[in-house]
Image (cartoon, rainbow, N blue to C red):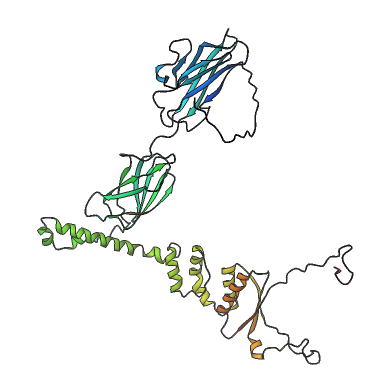
Amino acid sequence: MSTLELPALYVDSVALVVSTPRLVVVNRDPSPGESGVPVDATLALELIDTGADGVNRASVHVWVDGVLAFDGGALPEITAAFAGPLAGATQTADTLRVALHPLVPMASLATVSVRVAGQTVGGAASVDEVYSFVVEDRTAPRVVGAQALAQKTVRVAFDEPVLLPGGSSFVLTPKAAPAVPVAVVASAIDGSVVLLTLDTEMTPDVVHEVVALGVTDLFGNVVLAPYDRATFTGFRPARPQTRRFELWRMLPKHNRRDDQTGDLFRFIACMQEVTDLLLADVDRWPDIFDLERAPESFLDLILRDLGNPFPFELDTMGKRRLASVLVEMYRQKGTAKGIQNAIRFFLGIDISAISPFNADTLTLGESELGIDWVLGPSDRFARYAFNVEVARILADRERRQLRAIVEYLKPAHTHFVDLVEPLPPILPNHWELGLSDLGETTDLH
């Protein structure tokens, strides 16, 4: 037996298990419930008599999946199917060790059961125990099917979760003509399903074959032929049932009759595919201008077409909401209601009030020059100036956005002066024994 030298060994905990039976099965390798056992693993176990009699070797029998592998009362003790080079049996005063080396590797993912039965010398104690383990996965994944989900999307399903290591790929080949060659430009895994994105639209109704190359399961088993491929029909977009737009039928009958070689038909079939793609794009137009279904790139174009004046960054849902209310914002521009609704839409803040601007001005007989006198605005400015009051303290980003919203939506001749926020809570200066001086560093509160 080879010697394994470890750089260090740490024992975290030791548990003492008291076994009431005298004859016990220990040191089982593989252990009960173990998974991922190599297919060519050696099976080993020990029978120990905790008393003074010792193990009766002739009474010991070991079955593997119901097949007798060891019979201590026969010669040879180990049957031929388990008598590999590493097989053997050794006995000491109180221990019998049995090692079984199957000549045929165990089946991938098989649940192997081991039964051990035996007695002590004199028959005072006996054991009959069954345990099991699971063999490692050596089964290659299989392609179970493929389906075209869209003009540029294909779904490939496997019989187990898979991985796409470096160098793996998918090859798509049309099996009929005329057909456009396609290539995979991106792939995404979702367990046992792989979504493929193609570089161009596939030809509708033409049978394609997809071949998986280098794809592995979670244990590194590579997909193998002939289970590495599947066929599917090219995706045809939905179209109205009453539509009749066949270029071949539009040709004069004498041109169709003169096409003895079929070259004209194949040429028109190529034109028909391009025509069908254009019609499919036309059919998708309602999905493009519909605010609830439009792709995000088209949402940006819709907002640009509506003249979106707000430079704020919005997510997809925010863009859809803004596009749906932007026209109404234009209608409410120049009103207090419009300002309130826009601030609520963008910031989720309900403003307390839009109040007239009141400046500190010179009061005759009371104000002192250079002390409490403030040069006030003109009457015309003050007549059209206003403040916006909010109920909570805003962050810097919220202040900037609120000012931008108000400046855009306010009437052109008015003046937005102050954003009035509540004052921060006053933190009183507490009195500290032995440190504070009355009237200097202490406030009565």
- Residue 130: percent from left, percent from top: 52, 21
**Relative to residue 136, is residue 345 depicted above or below?**
below
Image coordinates of residue 294 in percent, x first then y, are 42, 63
Q: How many marks?
A: 0
* Res 433 → quadrant: bottom right
> The C terminus is located in which quarter?
bottom right
Camera-side residue of 45 and 203: 45
> Quick check: 31 left or right of 380?
left
Classify residue 40 as left or right of residue 267: right
Farthest residue to the top: give it.
122
Residue 359 in the image, given as x and y percentages of width and height: 71, 85
Q: Is residue 244 left or right of residue 336?
A: left
Residue 339, image quadrant: bottom right
Question: With respect to residue 342, does 412 lie above or below?
Answer: below
Instruction: Between residue 213 and residue 113, name the one nearer to us.
Output: 213
Residue drawn at point x = 56 percent, y = 14 percent = 92
The residue lying toward the viewer, choosing from 89 and 394, is: 89
Residue 317 position (above or below residue 118): below
Q: Residue at x 69, y 73 (%)?
A: 421
The residue closer to the viewer here, 351 or 132, is 132
The residue furthest bottom is 364
